[in-house]
Each structure stands twice: as structure tokens, then as C-alpha cells.
Amino acid sequence: MEFAEYQKATRATDQRAGVELEDVAVHLLGLVGEAGSVAAEYKKKLRDQDAHPMWKARIREEMGDVLWYLSTLANKLDLTLEDIARSNLEKTRNRWLPTDRDQLDLDYPEQEQLPRTGTYEFRTFVNTDDRAAVQVYLDGAKAGNVLTDSAFVDDGYRFHDVFHLAYATVLGWSPVTRALLKRKRRSNPAVDQNEDGGRAIVFEEGVAAIAFAYAASHNNLEGVERVDHDLLEQIRRVVALTEVGVRSAADWEMAILRGFAMFRQLIANNGGSVTFDASTRSLTYAPPVSR
């Protein structure tokens, strides 16, 4: 049976077919009640095991009641089950399925592409202000300026370029990394300005700051396997109008978790190296080398 056919058929059995507040409320309460009945029926299956041979038929009936209430609510709210189902699939695919590993800058000269493989080295030292500092190198060449935590507390933010590296590796996007490595797409002035320019850099630094604040209250994501959906959607809204808008929430979750896995290692060992491979979206840590 098609969704549209079923939804049309439920109109005939709706004893409160109106669309007033009470009519909607009755069906909302019915939906909640039937959802509870599904759980109760499964509880009986767990309790009684083989002594409850009819559990599948019973739970099918209860789930059918849930579907009926959902359908009649959709009728009252001028929605269709087909649209609801399609929208839900889009949402869940975005949340749980990474996108293809297509390279966003493949059509640009090699010197304007983000590097696909390499090694970032985070060399630490104490600067003239007696502050912990980091200089990043890509395959032995300096990448960007010396960084400190720029805060009254030692929170390791001096290593935060690893987050930008994770975005570049997992998402194929990082205006900050392009600026550090001098790989802006200057052959296309519009892209250079709109995707690689100052506004895009601010967006990315903002995303890194949001993720950092979230991680700070979650032990730098130690032992965390899933990031809150609200955080991922907030980040996606920030960058929605940029090229990375094609990446899913699942992609962002992967980038954040893998970036913080490296960040924790860098803090624990006061530096080290991170080897990256964009084709596999992988980041691998190695301890500092004595010099």
C-alpha cells in the first residue's frame, strides 16, 4: 500500500475529523499513548519470552495504531506521510552517512589545491614572554605564525591548527589551511574572495571555537563517539552558504572527533607530528622527535 492511499483511507475512520485545537490534541495524546503501548508490548516479550507467542502480532497492531494517529495528525496539519518520510530520510542520511570523498578543489591547479597527504609537525618551545608556544611545519617547511594559547589559562589552544588540518583532510575544506600554506585559489578571483577570503576564514575560526568550547565541557571528547546533533547543525548553519555546505553532519562529526583525537595527543606529549591522508580521511599521530 502506498503512503498516499493509506493516508486517504484513514480519513474515513477518523471520529474527530475536525481541525480545531481539541481535535488535534486528542490525536496527539492518542499518538503518545499508542507509542507507550508499543513499548509495553515489547516489555511483555522480554518478561515472558516464549510464553508470549503472540507478541509479534500484538506489537504489529500497536505500531499500526501509532501509524494511524500519525496519519490523521498529518491530515489535520496539512502534511503528507510521503513528504514526512522523504524529509526524515534526508535528515537521517545527513546525520549518519558521510558523503562521497569528492575533492572540492580538483578542478584547480595543483598549487592551489589543499595537500592530499603530508605531515604536520608541531614544535613546541617557550617564547620570550615565557609562554608555551608552537610553530607548525608541513613536511619540514614553516606553516603560519607562532601560536600561543592567547588566554590566561593553559588550555592547549596553541595546537588548534590541528583542527583546521582535520577539516582539510576529512571535509576537503579549510580556508585557514589555504592561507597558512599559500594555496588560495587565485586563478578564480570570485572563489578566492568568497570561498578562501577573510569572511570564510572567520567562519572557520568560529566553527573551531564553537567546537572547542563544546569539547572543553566534554573532557576534550575523550571517550566520546558521538557529537550532539544540535552542535553539528549549528556548525552547518554557519557554513551553509560556502562550498563545505555539501558536507553532511556525519562528515563534520568525523572531522571534529578525529581532530580532537590528535589534539589530545599533542597536549599529552607537548607536541609531535600528525600525518594526514585525505583519500582515507585519516590522521595519525607520532610523538615528538628529540632534536
Image (cartoon, rainbow, N blue to C red):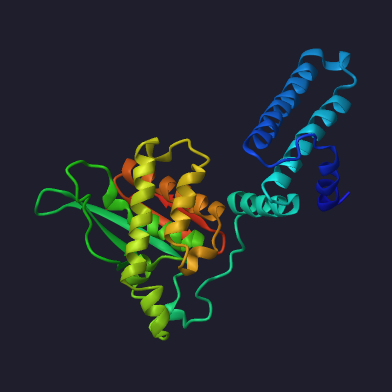
- Residue 134 point in image, percent of width and height: 24, 55
* 19 is higher (above) or lower (below) than 89: above
Residue drawn at x 48%, y 38% is 224
Say whether residue 28 is left or right of residue 17.
Answer: left
- Residue 109 point in image, percent of width and height: 47, 83
Residue 139 in sight from this viewpoint: no
Nearest the eye: 289 or 126: 126
Labels in figure, total:
0
**Extreme-left residue of the structure:** 129
Residue drawn at x 86%, y 51% is 5
Task: Report the quarter where the C terminus lies.
Answer: bottom left
Residue 217 placement: quadrant: top left
Residue 23 placement: quadrant: top right
Nearest the eye: 37 or 77: 77
Residue drawn at x 48%, y 45% is 230
- Residue 22 point in image, percent of width and height: 65, 33
Say whether residue 14 is left or right of residue 73.
Answer: right
Residue 175 in sight from this viewpoint: yes
* 161 is higher (above) or lower (below) than 29: below
Say whether residue 232 is left or right of residue 55.
Answer: left
Residue 219 placement: quadrant: top left
Say whether residue 23 is left or right of residue 214.
Answer: right
Nearest the eye: 152 or 34: 34
Nearest the eye: 175 or 156: 175
